């Protein structure tokens, strides 16, 4: 046997907007709240200098994985070469970790000791 609904379900009560101070809605109260959402922690991918990885390889890696043009990549590589390390880019945590993996994988495949790490900004 089949059953059919003969009555409509009871209507949901009309939403009531009531302010805590009993205001009848004729005025608008804006409360100042401390901000709850912070921007996500960002991570910089830092490449380290070594004595063996060819400059050209580093430039190509920076171009390829950090989307830099050749001139910018060359400047970053030279900074790393002179200072011992340099920032190649700043990303969310997951993206930064992926960039590190990509660089280490490419370096390993090419037989170079190039190292890079990600670290929280500030
Ligand atoms: N110091 C290396 C050389 O003289 C070049 C180099 C630059 C290596 C940057 C690593 O992250 C690096 N061949």
Image (tube, grey):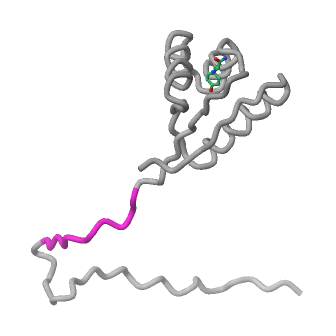
Q: Which residues are magenta?
A: 28-38
Q: Residue furthest front?
A: 51
Judge left or right: residue 83 versus residue 115: left
Q: Residue at the spot x=56%, y=10% of the render? A: 70
Q: Is residue 26 above or below residue 76?
A: below
Displayed-image quarter of ligand 1: top right
31 to the left or right of 69: left
**Is residue 2 found left or right of 67 in the rendered image?**
right
Q: Position of residue 40 (x, y in %)?
A: 47, 54
- Pick out the residue farthest to the right: 1
The residue under the point 25% across, 71% down is 33
The N terminus sits in image quarter? bottom right
Q: Please give the name of the residue rendered at 69% of the width and 35% of the height, measured from the top-left corner.
A: 115
* Residue 61 belongs to the span the image colors magenta: no
Rendering coords of residue 104 (x, y %)? 75, 34
Question: At 15% from the left edge and 77% from the top edge, which residue is drawn?
Answer: 25
Q: Nearer the viewer, residue 81 or 121?
A: 81
Asked where in the image residue 81 lies, by quadrant, the reply is: top right
Nearest the viewer among 46 and 52 is 52
The picture quadrant where one finds residue 77 is top right
Q: Position of residue 116 (x, y in %)?
A: 65, 37
**Residue nearer the viewer, 74 or 11:** 74
Identify the main secondary structure in magenta: loop
Taking the image as shown, residue 1 lies to the left or right of residue 5, namely right
């Amino acid at each position: 046997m089949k059953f059919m609904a003969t009555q409509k379900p009871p209507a949901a009560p009309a939403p009531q907007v009531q302010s805590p101070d009993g205001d009848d809605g004729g005025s608008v109260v804006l409360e100042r709240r401390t901000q709850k959402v912070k921007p996500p922690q960002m991570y910089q991918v830092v490449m380290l200098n070594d004595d063996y990885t060819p400059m050209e390889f580093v430039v190509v890696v920076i171009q390829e994985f950090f989307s830099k043009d050749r001139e910018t990549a060359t400047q970053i590589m030279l900074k790393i070469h002179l200072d011992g390390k340099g920032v190649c880019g700043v990303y969310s945590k997951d993206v930064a970790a992926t960039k590190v993996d990509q660089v280490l994988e490419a370096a390993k495949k090419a037989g170079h000791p190039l190292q890079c790490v990600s670290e929280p900004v500030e």
